[in-house]
Amino acid sequence: MMNRAEFMRQLEALLQGISPTEREEALQYYNDYFNDAGAENEQDVIAALGTPARVAENIKRDLSGSGYGDNPEERKPTGRHDMVEYQGTRAREIKEEKKMSTGMIVLIVILAVLASPILLGIGSGVVGILTGIVAAWFGLIIGFGVASILLFVILVVLIAAAVMTIMAGDIIVGMGLIGGGLLCGGIGILFLMLTVAMAGIATPAIFRGIASLCRGLFGGKQTA
């Protein structure tokens, strides 16, 4: 791939047939043209100008004054000044595009900085809500588990009290204590079932669903 140095070297060699003054002026002109475009746009400038042979031919044609044909619609730029006007705008367009891109980046950064408090607030709120939901869920599981244990303890205590009461001769009170104990035991079993269902079935299913949703959103389409 031709670079600036090779382009200018070939152009200088091809311009040996013109006067040293004109050759120096032409070489200086194109060196300035490369400088204005910038080193990062070197290949775009070369693509816009064409080959060194074409540029040299246009310069010589411009000096001879035979740059245009008879048909105005078929007129093409031939001299170095006309050629830059016809093709050289590409380098300036690249510089303008670069300025626009830089300005857009700066604008995005400024907007991001200005919006950061709002975004942080929204993010914190979402995290807080999710944390609250998770805490409430596991709080329910722990609460049902603790309640079931307490109810089973109450069952044992009431049964023991009922036996002692019956042995003391108060059968009616003893039967009432047994009934209350069995009721607590039944509720304890219900709470235990809820604890097992929430902790062992619902929670894993929820996490599997969240993982599947994340894979669907961020994992992309799987290829066979």
Image (cartoon, rainbow, N blue to C red):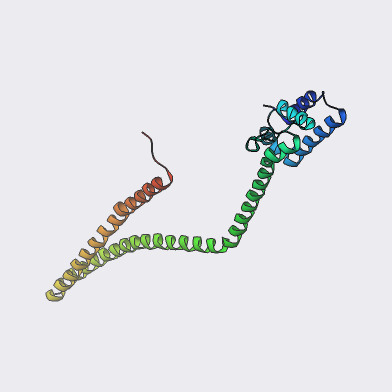
Res. 74 in view:
yes
Quadrant of the image containing the C terminus: top left
* Residue nearest the observer in this picture, 223 or 137: 223
Against 44, residue 158 (above or below) is: below
Quarter occupied by residue 87:
top right
Q: Is residue 7 visible?
A: no
Q: Quadrant of residue 215?
A: top left
In the image, 115 versus 5, the foreground residue is: 5
* Mark count: 0
- Determine the image quadrant of residue 40: top right
- Is residue 215 depicted above or below 78 in this figure? below
Using the image as rendered, state which of residue 40 and residue 50 is in the foreground: 50
Query: Toward the viewer: 190 or 91?
Result: 91
Indicate left or right for 99 with 121 as reference: right
Considering every residue shown, the one lying at the far front of the view is 70
Percent position of residue 100, x then y: 64, 50
Residue 132: % across, % down: 42, 63
Left or right: 221 in relation to 12: left
**In the rendered view of the protein, which quadrant contains the N terminus?**
top right
Query: Residue 8 placed where, x, y %?
Result: 77, 29
Q: Residue 178 location, x and y as percent?
A: 17, 69
163 displayed left or right of 23? left
Q: Residue at x 48, y 64 (%)?
A: 125
Residue at figure coordinates x 74%, y 34% from the top left: 79
